[in-house]
Amino acid sequence: MILHVGHLKVSLAVNPDIRLFDDGTDPDDVRRGAFADSWLLSALSIISAASVGDGGVDEQLFVSPIGGDGRPVLESYTGAYAVKITVGGKWQVVIVDDYFPALEASQADDDNKGLAVGHSYGARELWVSLLEKARGTVESHLLTPRTVVHASSPRAYAKFFGSYAALETGHVHHALSAFTGAQSEEIFLAGAGRGVGKKSLWKKMTKYKRNGYLLGAGTITGNLVEKQVQDIGLVFGAAYTILDVRDSDGEQLIKLRNPPGDHEVHFGRVQRCSGST
């Protein structure tokens, strides 16, 4: 289905009860919009999976005043939010507002509530849309000469300039670095997982998981995959969160979480219902 972006909409017009966070963060909060930036949303899903309910995302990425009770005040009454993001290895603060591109009314549903951007289910929370917008601001600033964008344009979404199109090409590990400030590594399994390297790769993965690293696994496009692999329920051209890496009964197992917005069942030899996963 082709999604048509029509106009800008303020968050409260999308959902009068919308909040920055609703009971912390969770990978289920991350839903894709009309733009092809799954690499970015997958990184947000990986980060939120590692910090479910503990406020990790908001504490790291949202600059908030401290209230009288000593806790951060996360809501904004002006519609402006200060987001921290790394550029060239240095933390920068980007100010973004809560106006977002909206879909035509006929394409609004209970999930997107008319938002064309990345969002939470039912547009209950703002953090996904704001972090996507902040990253888009930075990407546009790096890639595009300074221009003036008319406010009525459906892509006039950032403080600086540019469009969400700047997010349509990217890598998950780059987004992880941008949102965590940490170095990231991309490992190509076709080479690293062959021969003697297979044992070394497994040791590296178990070590990374044991040390609390954020881990993900990407799939290639479906047209490059044999049919028997296509039929096991994996999503191709997507990034999965790695929840666990373990040895169990002589098997080397990796527990994956579905990409943002996907909830299909995997039909491989070890499935979701298996007690060992």
Image: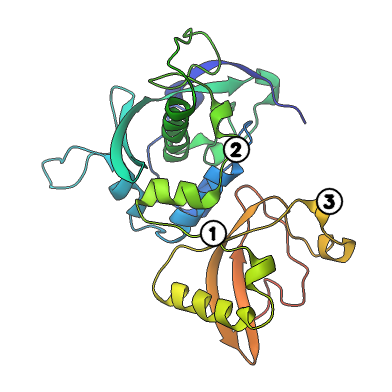
- Judging by the rendered image, the residue that carries numbered circle 2 is 169
Question: Toward the viewer: 54 or 243?
Answer: 243
Q: CA distance from mark 2 to mark 3?
A: 19 Å
Query: Upstream in the sequence, badge 2 or badge 1?
Result: 2
Question: At 53% across and 37% down in the image, what residue appears?
Answer: 119
- Judging by the rendered image, the residue that carries numbered circle 1 is 186
On residue 223, which mark appears? Answer: 3
User: Residue 44's x, y, as percent?
Assistant: 48, 48
Question: At 82% across and 59% down in the image, what residue appears?
Answer: 225
Query: Upstream in the sequence, badge 3 or badge 1?
Result: 1
User: Residue 163's x, y, as percent?
Assistant: 53, 22
Question: At 41% across and 33% down in the image, what residue appears?
Answer: 134
Element at label 2: loop
Q: How many marks?
A: 3
Q: Amino acid at mark 2?
A: Thr
Residue 29 visible from this viewpoint: yes
Question: Toward the viewer: 134 or 262?
Answer: 134
Query: Upstream in the sequence, badge 2 or badge 3?
Result: 2
Element at label 1: loop
Q: Residue 188, located in which quarter of the rendered image?
A: bottom right
Q: Amino acid at mark 3?
A: Asn
Left/right of residue 47 with respect to residue 181 in the rendered view: right
Q: Residue 229, located in which quarter of the rendered image?
A: bottom right
